[in-house]
Image (cartoon, rainbow, N blue to C red):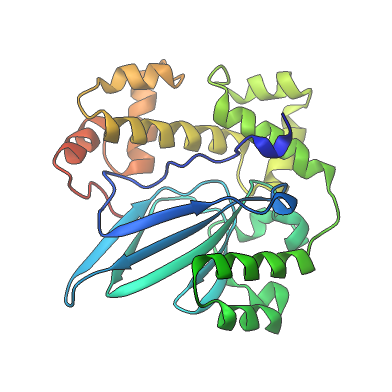
Amino acid sequence: MGDTDLSTTSEHGVLGVRDVDFTLERLPPAPDLAALVERHWVVTWELPPGREASVTLLPHPCVNLVLDAGRLGISGVGLGRFTYAYRGTGRVVGVKFRPGAFLPFLGRPVGDITGTAVPASALWGPAADALAARMTGPVEVLVERVEAFLRERWPEHDPQVELVGRIVAALLHDRTITRVDDVTDRFGLTPRTLQRLFRRYVGVSPKWVLRRYRLHEAAAALAAEQHRPWAEIAAELGYYDQSHFIRDFTDAIGMPPLAYAAACRRREAPVSA
């Protein structure tokens, strides 16, 4: 199996029971871009006049290129959950880069833009604004245009991106990894080297990535199986200290797991940022 055959981000991250007022479509990248691009995503909505809705998300450890309201921006890794409010008819289109894979485009540590969003023109100049102006029409056309834009600026191969990708895929898929020490042992890295690698390429620590992925899974499981004991889910995800799980879950999601499951049963928007 090649590195690009294994996902480095999950499809979790939308909190609560998904609102029927919007649709989320995920599209794979062209094969020649898959080493750096995880996927494209499109959110669309159509609400009656006078009505407003919102969605709360817990971000992945990824940089996204986002077209929203005609503006093209680069969003660094989001540290906390955020709520997006929408009304009328609209669409947001994004490119989700694999964790660590945006550094070759950025040319400096990804941690520099963690928790921030900058105009794409700050990196790519007027060509980014020209692309934003052309991002109209069917989704397939938008994907073709943004992929052509990226191909024209495709960076040189960086083997460190591949290493980061393998580590992140292990954090996502391997439930036997419960501590950062498990990563250093498996990949033959010192803790300091691993931390520096993630700070530069991912923008957050490996511990942060591991915790975020497990909390994504926990929130998704509680939303889908609202009557299932949360302690059982926590144990499956490697949380053997229940108080530790409650603390991590509450900090990230905004409410304890029991309250979150109850809100999902009521199909309420359980949290906001």
Between 256 and 58, the one nearer to me in the picture: 58
Q: Left or right of 199: which side holds 83?
A: left
Between 108 and 99, the one nearer to me in the picture: 99
Q: Left or right of 148: which side holds 179?
A: left
The extreme left residue here reads 266
Say which residue appears at 77% left-offset and 34% top-offset. Answer: 193
Asked if residue 24 shows in the view, the reply is: yes
Q: How far across and how far down the image is residue 32, in percent?
A: 75, 52
Q: Quadrant of residue 190?
A: top right
Say which residue appears at 69% left-offset and 55% top-offset. Answer: 102
Q: Quadrant of residue 239?
A: top left
Say which residue appears at 22% left-offset and 50% top-offset. Answer: 269
Q: How far across and how far down the image is residue 152, in percent?
A: 78, 69
Asked if residue 195 shows in the view, the reply is: no
Q: How many marks?
A: 0
Q: Taking 89 as reference, is 78 above or below it? A: above
Quadrant assignment for the N terminus: top right
Q: Left or right of 67: which side holds 113?
A: right
Say which residue appears at 76% left-offset and 44% top-offset. Answer: 161
Q: Taking 187 as reference, is 135 above or below it? A: below
Q: How far across and how far down the image is residue 195, in percent?
A: 70, 37
Quadrant assignment for the C terminus: bottom left
Q: How far across and how far down the image is residue 135, in percent?
A: 55, 76
